[in-house]
Image (cartoon, coloured by chain):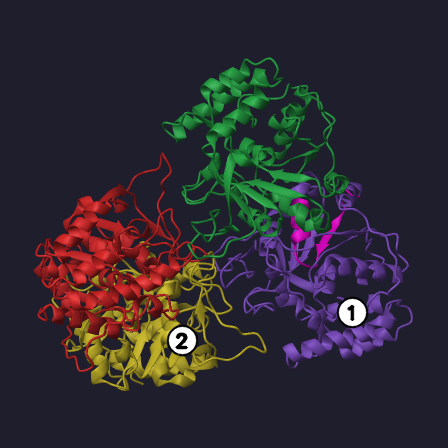
Chain colours: A red, B yellow, C purple, D green
Amino acid sequence: MYCLLNADIELVGIVASYGNVTKEEATANAAYLLDVAGRSDIPVIPGASMPITEEDTVFYPEIHGKNGIGPIQPPSNFQYQIYPFGTIPYLIEKYKNELIVVDTGRSTTLANVFILFPDYVEMVHSFYVMGGAFFVPGNATALAEANFYGDPNSSNFVLNKAHNLTITPLNVTQHAVLTEDLAMEISKNSKNYYSFMLEPIFEYYYEFYKKSVPGIQGAPMHDLLTIMVIVKPEIVDYIFYDATVIESTEAKGMSFIDYRPTSKKGKTRIAVNLHYDLFIKELRRIMLKE
Amino acid sequence: MYCLLNADIELVGIVASYGNVTKEEATANAAYLLDVAGRSDIPVIPGASMPITEEDTVFYPEIHGKNGIGPIQPPSNFQYQIYPFGTIPYLIEKYKNELIVVDTGRSTTLANVFILFPDYVEMVHSFYVMGGAFFVPGNATALAEANFYGDPNSSNFVLNKAHNLTITPLNVTQHAVLTEDLAMEISKNSKNYYSFMLEPIFEYYYEFYKKSVPGIQGAPMHDLLTIMVIVKPEIVDYIFYDATVIESTEAKGMSFIDYRPTSKKGKTRIAVNLHYDLFIKELRRIMLKE
Amino acid sequence: MYCLLNADIELVGIVASYGNVTKEEATANAAYLLDVAGRSDIPVIPGASMPITEEDTVFYPEIHGKNGIGPIQPPSNFQYQIYPFGTIPYLIEKYKNELIVVDTGRSTTLANVFILFPDYVEMVHSFYVMGGAFFVPGNATALAEANFYGDPNSSNFVLNKAHNLTITPLNVTQHAVLTEDLAMEISKNSKNYYSFMLEPIFEYYYEFYKKSVPGIQGAPMHDLLTIMVIVKPEIVDYIFYDATVIESTEAKGMSFIDYRPTSKKGKTRIAVNLHYDLFIKELRRIMLKE
Amino acid sequence: MYCLLNADIELVGIVASYGNVTKEEATANAAYLLDVAGRSDIPVIPGASMPITEEDTVFYPEIHGKNGIGPIQPPSNFQYQIYPFGTIPYLIEKYKNELIVVDTGRSTTLANVFILFPDYVEMVHSFYVMGGAFFVPGNATALAEANFYGDPNSSNFVLNKAHNLTITPLNVTQHAVLTEDLAMEISKNSKNYYSFMLEPIFEYYYEFYKKSVPGIQGAPMHDLLTIMVIVKPEIVDYIFYDATVIESTEAKGMSFIDYRPTSKKGKTRIAVNLHYDLFIKELRRIMLKE
């Protein structure tokens, strides 16, 4: 929603993969959200159906709703077009050296793109990934954040191979909380064509977070923050360390950096402190057209 | 070569990936071998460039030669066409329920196809994989065969998801030895358009095997046997067990089955004993047109 | 039994640890078997109660009986003396450079002895360990033999540190089958003071093996063979390779050697082929006093 | 030193094991420090020589000095008595239900005591362990604290089996910094018989910490704090969670607890916040006899 409402961002395609819901549901959701915004011209490309770890993926309907966007679902007769996987190298070449790839889910599809089209990947301008949890508990396990836990091999691959990479990990996104008051204010704002669905979505997520994080004042916007820092990098602080994901044992999916005082810094930019006032200001600017 | 020379097999496409050489070299080699056979109409599709494990792939020029087919390489001015990755679901659909997929290298590309096009994969008739080593030492490590060692995550994925799967592991392929005498006989046979390159290729491989397996009487034809059992299944015996690949620790890449006397059998067909006389008979039939 | 019946062996102490039964039961059993032989002068020393892996140990009463020697158990009023753990370095020093240590169970106690008394361990003449399974299925898991599976860390430690080490692995001990005929013959032999308990013990074990290894002709004598090769080394053939135990993943407890044709040999002696006729001849010599 | 200077603590024995130095050096050091205090009556018991992981132990002379107490070493003609390992169950029984076991090094010996003498271990009053690092970088690796890293299997064992267990992890001990000023003040204090060696020891450690933790104001007293919280528990805050140590992969030696908002609490007491003023007050009270 933020992408489409923000004139500074030109959304050129959405790759929809398994994760919170199946690939098919994610594809329909993406097409529907584009349709609501009157932007059905933006291609929706189905990506991965499952992680490279052959385990069956666990979906979390109690968090994301049966269909992946809380209680909202596309109308049953909703029709939409999908684009083939080969559209990805085409788009990369078209927006050569300017394309920014944002990955807010499991990294399976992105790793596949690296494996299949390495020459095209070099033409991407930069990568933004939501994932990991540094020096805080995870949300999927005691140690692991859900995106990195869902396909640790692919996440590790992306962390290792992607250039100009920015990570917005759980330790910072968990503070990007959308409060009930602001959510209600946005849902009543007529300038925003998503207003009508915002209240039920917010209530659905908030209900879950109240249970899992007692005392929380709203719902954290993990994916929104990941996109927001592209246009408003000053919303967070950064450290530069190259991160790794543990692929097996009890620590599966855990990300870590070597943060000891004298260790070597890296090239990956990792968001650390959230400037909450700036986050809310930007959120209001786009969602309330202030 | 065997595929093209054997009228019982209709080769409908070759997916060329990294493995013994880079993806680019493998693609050129495939195109060249088709060209020699006068079959440039068969599509060559570049696949994976690297495994999902983010480690750098080790190539083995001392085994397979600098370019992947011993000392042979395509002419420097050799031109050829390649087909996009999206050709794969198209081919699967075209040869729906009849297509046999043979994987004689790392399983990275095949796993990607499962992840990206699961609905198409269901239309494949059966899968034949060369890989693993059961109850014998490996060739990549003390425990692991090279194909499964090269991308154990993808191999495990394929072993777990593929239907009608036949494995021809190292313990059987290592006995499918092409002797020097027969190699020379084939290389002098004018009915076979590959004859001219067979002697140098054989000598290259045999040189390597004499060093690594003292006393061996020729070069084992791992990939050839994998294809041969499609048309001549009686060349080997089979057991039915579902196999697993160890993904980490010292046992990385090792495959195993639960072969204890009272354990449960599986659905994967695994080749076990080679009937060498049948193997040689078939080899002569195709290569010498006997 | 074999040790006490064989005049070539001087048994100087028994360390009784957890494994098939608890440490307490193993201690009582050892004391009782010595008592039956009229050799209560031989010290029984309680060893480890559990493995270093903090998992709870699984006992196998269906194999070894509720008390560890099939259906046999010491009389309820059986009294015996135990010796403290510190007796071990004392015994090693007393039989300096002549003491042979035989380990037929989990290697926890033996590893502890290495850790606590490294200077004494150097005075041991040689070590004989029953454990591991090379190129055959395991008996505890598809890959692992029970002794190495029970405490893989300690087994690995011993394999790595012990000098003059001989392993009799499952692949050879499983062929050291005591047939029903011979068992009955021994149980009727009056020269052997264990005769009276042999029939019920044999029947108990044989019952189990008939179920787990359909078609087997008797009960394999894993531990007996381990001891027998000390005095009759010609009963088996040997290879020399240093073995390793996998400590985690699905391969936990699996032992392996690098047996590829050109790999480096090691210093550990591993039994491989059983000369069954020699085995039976020695068994008859001792048990039937032939 | 703190133990002997503090009348509230009755030191009844020291088990000296490998760790920062070899077992032999640690034994001599313990005996020497007792000798300086005029307390050679307290038994010194040699414990483990190496960890159960069969890797060679790395000592850190750049931290702890060639002999383990910075530049200090026992006189070359220093004579002392050692007590056998069997003294441990004897001491436990003697101080039944009152004995407090403090483990400030690798947990190998302590795990061995659990394995060999489980009935005695039950008579121990409580356990205090220095080890682990929660939500902060490690000091041995990016993830692991040195004590847990040195023998993760044994540490895990102790964390799992010990009752009334208090852990003082790196995240709290690293703040227990002894400043240069206070160190000098203590070293000039005539009431403290260790004064003469304090300055050189402090300077040695401080030199190391200045390099490894730029900006640090003194040397952290990891082991001292572990003992101090026995008599002054109010010096730190506590949380109650059961901790686990990762035994393999890149996360080897890392400790973790499930600290997510709704996770289950445990029975292990883990120190978290240091009340630095209380720490210094207690340090002054004992070391300066204030």
Separation of marks 1 and 2 at Cα, in angstroms: 44 Å
- Residue D66 picture quarter: top right
Residue D75 among magenta residues: no
Q: How many residues crowd mark 2 within 10 Å: few (<14), some (14–19), many (20+)? A: many
Q: Is residue D220 left or right of residue D108?
A: left
In the picture shown, does residue C161 fall above or below C6? above
Q: Amino acid at mark 1?
A: Lys
Q: Is residue B208 visible?
A: no
Callout 1 touching callout 2 (CB < 8 Å): no
User: Which contiguous range is marked in magenta?
Assistant: C95-114
Which residue is under mark 1?
C281
Which residue is under mark 2?
B167
Give the number of the mark in front: 1 or 2.
2
- Residue C233 in percent (x, y) is at 71, 59
Looking at the picture, tell me which residue is in the foreground, D169 or D203. D169
Q: Amino acid at mark 2?
A: Ile
Q: Is residue B84 left or right of residue B132?
A: left
- Residue A124 in percent (x, y) is at 15, 55
Mark 1 element type: helix
Residue C112 among magenta residues: yes
The quadrant of the rendering that contains the N terminus of chain C is: bottom right
Q: Residue at x 70, y 49 (%)?
A: D122
